[in-house]
Image: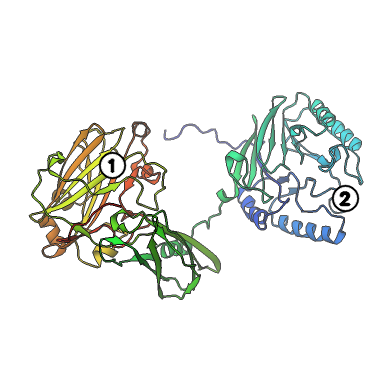
Amino acid sequence: MPWTHLAANDADDDFHFVIVSDRTGSARPGVFESAIPKVNLLEPAFVVSVGDLIEGDTEDQAQLDREWDEFEGFVAGLETPFFYAAGNHDMSNAVMAETWQARFGPSYYSFLYKDVLFLVLNSELFGMVRDMHTPVPGPWTQAEQMAFIDETLQRFPNPRWTIVIIHQPRWDYADAPQDDWRKVEAMLGQRDYTVFAGHSHRYVKIVRQDRRYITLATTGGGSRLRGLMHGEFDHVALVSMTDAGPRIANLTLDGIQDENVTTAASRDAVQKLRTAVYSVPAFGSGTRFEAGSVAFDVANTTDKDMTVAFNVDPGPDLVYAAQPQPFTVAPGQIERVEIALAASEALGHLPYHAISPGRAVWSLATDVGGEPFRFEKTTALLPVAPLPMPSGPVPTVDGDLTDWPALPYAVHRQGDVATARTAQTDISFSFGVREAEGDVYFAVQVVDDDIVASSALGPREQDGLLLVVDARNEPQRSTETRRFATGMARNSLTLADAAPDLLLPAESRAAVTWKTKRTATGYVAEAKVSGAFLDAQAGGAWQMLRIGVTAVDWDAHEIRNRIPWHVRGSSGTALHWQPYRFGEAPVAGSGTFERGKQQASSAR
């Protein structure tokens, strides 16, 4: 039978509820409000709070009324009951306590649902935050609350579970009086219970009395939002009551989305904005870069105005002195943006091929279905000029590089700005290129201390090289950066006799021959690309080539765990010479070589 069993998880006594946490204490506007429709998606039986619902901390009755009116307006959007709990921001003086009583009645109470007892306490009666030894003044006393707790627990001596809700996690404060809380724990005795609190704005689970005591993070309250390891995040807790007790799922607010998380309109908008900014071919002159500009076209293919802003990070080799200003692109229009750059004075004039690219981060905003929509995109900043394609004698493609002079192109740091940069890459490589009798030859030397190569692995599951050669004429050679061109010589060169990469065009595989060999420090590769193939691309004798070289590195533990190489590439071990042509931040015309151009010095 194509199922495991038919014991569906739908017991009559099971249910789930949601707990929302601190909204205030330097509240971040809009966060708690955004949680309301997301909680409705979860369809809980009811919602419970752990307090700090308003900023409060005032005796100004008009201000308190405004804040409570606002909050009650928020929870009116819930489709299930909402149970209040008092926090220090809600009740820090007698006026606030009396306001609570007038609006909501008791500040501590209990209820029973499907034989689960909920005990909602007022932590400010144990002692106020500003004075841990003094209960909040007002209609109630701590003695009355303690008597209520004792009476309630005696009245319900054996529920299937007890849930305790309290704002301050008194048990977790070294300077807080513990006597009353220890008395509560003694009253709870050996029954099954779980305690939920807030106040700290940092999530932590503590086990006391062999029971779970959970302090929630925030639902819009003040937070540095440093992430899960710091316990700082916006969330709600989805608690499912089962025969074995509560199961707790912490749902971060950005992880709860309705069915409109992506619509046809937003999908199309993303695609249009994703391709709205693109690099424009702009070749410099000479062999070294002193100053110049890189150009981008910003195209608005939507039917609404598009607001554009960008920031520039010129990287280690370039200087950017201007102050970019936001601008608007009307529907159907294209705006040209030129970004002026100069070589760093400390490094002097750089060979074009040795420049580390900078980056520009673009913010594109428009309207989609009446709602504001924003998209960020990163582009590479790299001045380019045609590089020399030297000619020479025909080398033997045998993996022996003694018939090659020094390899001029050294790659020891990531050249693709959309791939995470690392302080030190795990591999490095250098390469040279040569034309001989119309064919193009490559020599590559890779330094790698952990070689993975096996005929049992596919070509994209082991160490190797990705070689892209494009001899087509302009504008295809420089501007078609987002798709694989038919007939382009694009090959994976692996160290083992792996199965051919069937994702590549057959004519491309046939156009390339290669040989790889291990060395004491890694491996070398030689490759030949057929001149006849390149001439066919160019529609005559080829004159310009666009070349991309990438060394792909696997380590042994990744093969065991089957981590895909393109995922590894995103962490910096698919090492690109220049911005990857088929990546997120290509540079038009990068890696272009000109046949017959005079060789220049490659020194930095």
Look at the image and tell me whether residue 56 can be seen: yes
Looking at the rendered structure, the kind of residue marked 1 is Arg
Above or below: residue 121 compared with residue 419: above
Residue 128, how many percent across, how many down?
84, 42
Q: Could you tell me which secondary element the residue under label 2 belongs to?
A: helix
Residue, disc 2: 101
Which quadrant holds residue 271? bottom left
Marks counted in the figure total 2
Residue 210, how many percent across, how many down?
69, 24
Q: Nearer the viewer, residue 139 or 523?
A: 523
Residue neighbourhood size for the residue with mark 1, other residues' Cα within 10 Å, grouped as few (<14), some (14–19), many (≥20): many
Above or below: residue 134 compared with residue 485: above
Q: Quadrant of the N terminus?
A: top left
Which quadrant holds residue 194? top right
Query: Of marks 2 and 1, which one's residue comes earlier in the chain?
Result: 2
Look at the image and tell me whether residue 304 can be seen: no
Looking at the image, is mark 2 or mark 1 nearer the viewer?
Answer: 1
Looking at the rendered structure, the kind of residue marked 2 is Gln
> Is 78 left or right of 501, judged from the image as shown?
right
Residue 382, how many percent across, how many down?
35, 59
Q: Could you tell me which secondary element the residue under label 1 belongs to?
A: loop
| Residue located 71% across and 47% down the image | 22
Residue, disc 1: 460
Residue neighbourhood size for the residue with mark 2, other residues' Cα within 10 Å, grouped as few (<14), some (14–19), many (≥20): some
| Residue located 37% across and 56% down the image | 357
Q: Are marks 2 and 1 in contact (CB under 8 Å)?
A: no
Residue 196, how many percent across, how many down?
72, 37
> Is 177 left or right of 208, judged from the image as shown?
right
Cα distance, mark 2 to mark 1? 68 Å
Q: Nearer the viewer, residue 371 or 228?
A: 228
> Is 133 left or right of 550, judged from the image as shown?
right
Q: Which mark is residue 473?
A: none
